[in-house]
Image: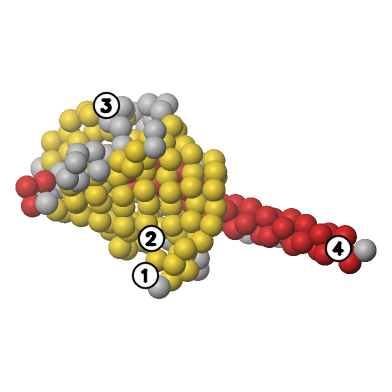
């Protein structure tokens, strides 16, 4: 009898904890769906070559205009921007704009908008928690689809207090293509009308 009660208690606890995790991941995704605009600073590493290439970038998102990533370093690429919009990816520099198509793969140019998209709309395949820089973070692994229709995984760590991103890994077919350490993030949420 005691054994049966212990098993029932353990199963009840598992169900309760599973429900709490689902609620947390839903809260994170609802937060990202509500973002109307955002600004971020990030340290990116592209793992597409053996040695990897490091970048510092600023990102600016507006729901109506799209997402612009501007490289700040290395120096030879500083000022080069990529605009990810509904009609594809465009490179801009010194006032000139060039279409870059919609099938650019996973890169430093598009990883920040893909990170935000996965956080809002991706299918959560795994959830957990980790400590990053001494702070408790929620970790989600999300499966999403890029504008070219190809799936990718985004392992995303967000701060447990305000859900701002702190680190992400974007991968395709088991190969990490880009990592992003977000050093600054601010966002404005859409206004919801008051009821009553």
Q: From the viewer's perspective, is the residue at label 1 or at label 4 nearer?
A: 4
First of labels 3, 1 by sequence position: 3
Tell me: 23 left or right of 41: right
Q: From the viewer's perspective, is the residue at label 1 or at label 2 nearer?
A: 1
Tell me: 162 left or right of 64: right
Tell me, yes or no, whether the two marked residues, 3 and 2, touch with CB atoms within 8 Å.
no
Q: Residue at x 36, y 43 (%)?
A: 170
CA–CA distance in space, label 1 to label 4: 42 Å
Is any part of residue 32 visible from this angle? Answer: yes
For residue 129, above or below residue 68: below
User: Is disc 2 placed on a helix, strand or loop?
Assistant: strand
Closer to the camera in the image, 42 or 130:
130
Closer to the camera in the image, 192 or 75:
75
Where residue 91 appears, as percent x and y from the top left, is 20, 36
Tell me: 2 left or right of 31: right
Say the numbered circle drawn on residue 3: 4
Where residue 192 appears, as percent x and y from the top left, is 57, 55
First of labels 1, 2 by sequence position: 1
Tell me, yes or no, whether the two marked residues, 1 and 2, touch with CB atoms within 8 Å.
yes
- Mark 4 burial class by Cα count in 10 Å: few <14, some 14-19, many 20+: few
First of labels 1, 4 by sequence position: 4
Residue on which the image places disc 2: 166
Q: Residue furthest left?
A: 76
Residue on which the image places disc 1: 133
First of labels 3, 4 by sequence position: 4
User: Is disc 1 placed on a helix, strand or loop?
Assistant: loop
First of labels 2, 4 by sequence position: 4
Say the numbered circle drawn on residue 101: 3
- Mark 2 burial class by Cα count in 10 Å: few <14, some 14-19, many 20+: many
Where residue 134 appears, as percent x and y from the top left, is 40, 73
């Amino acid at each position: 009898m005691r054994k049966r009660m212990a098993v029932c208690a353990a199963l009840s606890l598992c169900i309760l904890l599973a429900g709490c995790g689902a609620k947390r991941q839903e809260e994170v995704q609802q937060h990202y769906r509500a973002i109307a605009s955002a600004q971020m600073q990030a340290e990116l590493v592209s793992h597409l070559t053996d040695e990897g290439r490091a970048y510092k970038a600023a990102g600016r998102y507006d729901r109506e205009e799209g997402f612009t990533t501007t490289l700040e370093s290395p120096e030879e690429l500083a000022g080069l921007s990529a605009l990810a919009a509904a009609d594809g990816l465009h490179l801009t520099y010194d006032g000139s704009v060039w279409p870059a198509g919609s099938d650019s793969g996973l890169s430093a140019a598009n990883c920040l908008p893909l990170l935000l998209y996965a956080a809002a709309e991706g299918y959560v395949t795994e959830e957990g928690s980790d400590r990053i820089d001494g702070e408790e973070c929620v970790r989600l692994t999300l499966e999403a689809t890029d504008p070219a229709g190809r799936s990718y995984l985004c392992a995303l760590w967000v701060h447990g207090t305000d859900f701002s991103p702190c680190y992400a890994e974007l991968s395709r077919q088991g190969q990490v293509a880009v990592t992003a350490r977000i050093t600054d993030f601010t966002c404005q949420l859409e206004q919801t009308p008051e009821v009553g």
